[in-house]
Image: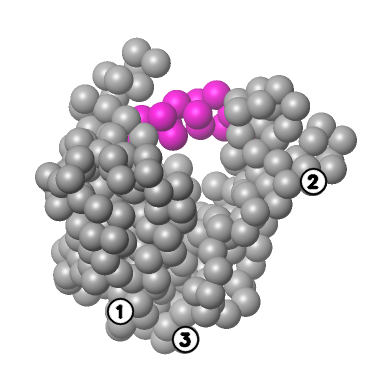
Amino acid sequence: MIRELIDALRTRCAPGARTLGLAYEAAAIAARHRRVGASWAPHLAASRETILRGAERCRKRERVLVIGAGACLDVPVGELAEHFSEVVLADVAVSLVARRWQRRSGGKVRAIAWDATGVLATFAARRASATAAEIERLLVESDPGEPPGGEADLVVSANCLSQLGLIPADRLDAVESDEDLSVRCTHAAARRHLAWLAVRPGVRVLLSDVARLDVAVDGRELEHRTIFENLMLRAPDKTWRWDLAPIPEWSREWNRVHEVGAWIDGPA
């Protein structure tokens, strides 16, 4: 708890992100990895492998942009820096790990605080006053603008699609009287992010959890919840399971497992 608070204070954030608790959220993710890293290892390895597969499809290798880079657990930063002239690590909360990569890279790696939704500062300023309808409309119409650092030959959305609308919505007062707001915001932010990705000229790699499962000790699925509906995504190129919170992280009776999909699109 104390380490998370210290790490959160040392995290550099995009405007509005700290007010909405995203610095602490990033520190908590890193803390969970320290506790259950062995359970996460297959998911992290699969994510890194998929990103490198996307890199192989790039005709040019001037710049790679990783959105949701976080603590770079699922990002093969070293390998990308070997093959691209510039690696841009973007996140609403720039981790100490990303900043360390920047310092040690000789200028090849840049760690940038960037809001992939474009609306966090507005949410933070209107945290108590924004209505549910206004919040959803802001996400539906959101536009983060040009990619940080400029257009890239490879753009990676790294396991953040389901979080873009969910986490900020949960920090807004309107959610207390509208229990479905977080779900609607999750879908709205995901649709805008996918639309933004679709117009990028380079190769695009999308990594995202698509379902949440509660799995008993004996392997029985106690509950299976699909995260997205009607996003019009094609079948993923690869799928796997992420043991996100093994017993007793969230429960002493079941493991929280996420189903993850990976998509690689763009020039062959």
Quadrant in which residue 165 is drawn = bottom left
- Which residue type does callout 1 highlight? Arg
- Name which residue lies at 20% across and 40% down: 128
Q: 183 or 20, which lies in front?
A: 183
Q: CA distance from mark 3 to mark 2?
A: 38 Å
Quadrant in which residue 167 is drawn = top left
Is residue 31 rendered to the left or right of residue 132? right
- Which residue type does callout 3 highlight? Ala
First in sequence: mark 3 vs mark 2: 2
Residue matched to label 2: 221
Bin the neighbour count of mark 1 within 10 Å (Cα to Cα): few under 14, some 14-19, many 20 and up. some
- Which residue type does callout 2 highlight? Glu
Q: Which residues are magenta?
A: 26-39
Check the image and name the residue furthest to the bottom: 267
Select label 3 or label 1 by which is in front: 1
SS type, badge 3: loop
Residue matched to label 3: 268
Q: Measured from the top left, where is residue 159 in percent x and y? A: 46, 54
Select label 2 or label 1 by which is in front: 2
Q: Main secondary structure of the magenta part?
A: helix
Residue 132 seen in render = yes
First in sequence: mark 3 vs mark 1: 1
Is residue 247 rendered to the left or right of residue 229? right
* Mark 3 touches mark 2? (CB < 8 Å): no
- Name which residue lies at 50% across and 61% down: 207
SS type, badge 2: strand
Q: 206 or 138, which lies in front?
A: 138
Check the image and name the residue furthest to the front: 177
Is residue 149 rendered to the left or right of residue 153? left
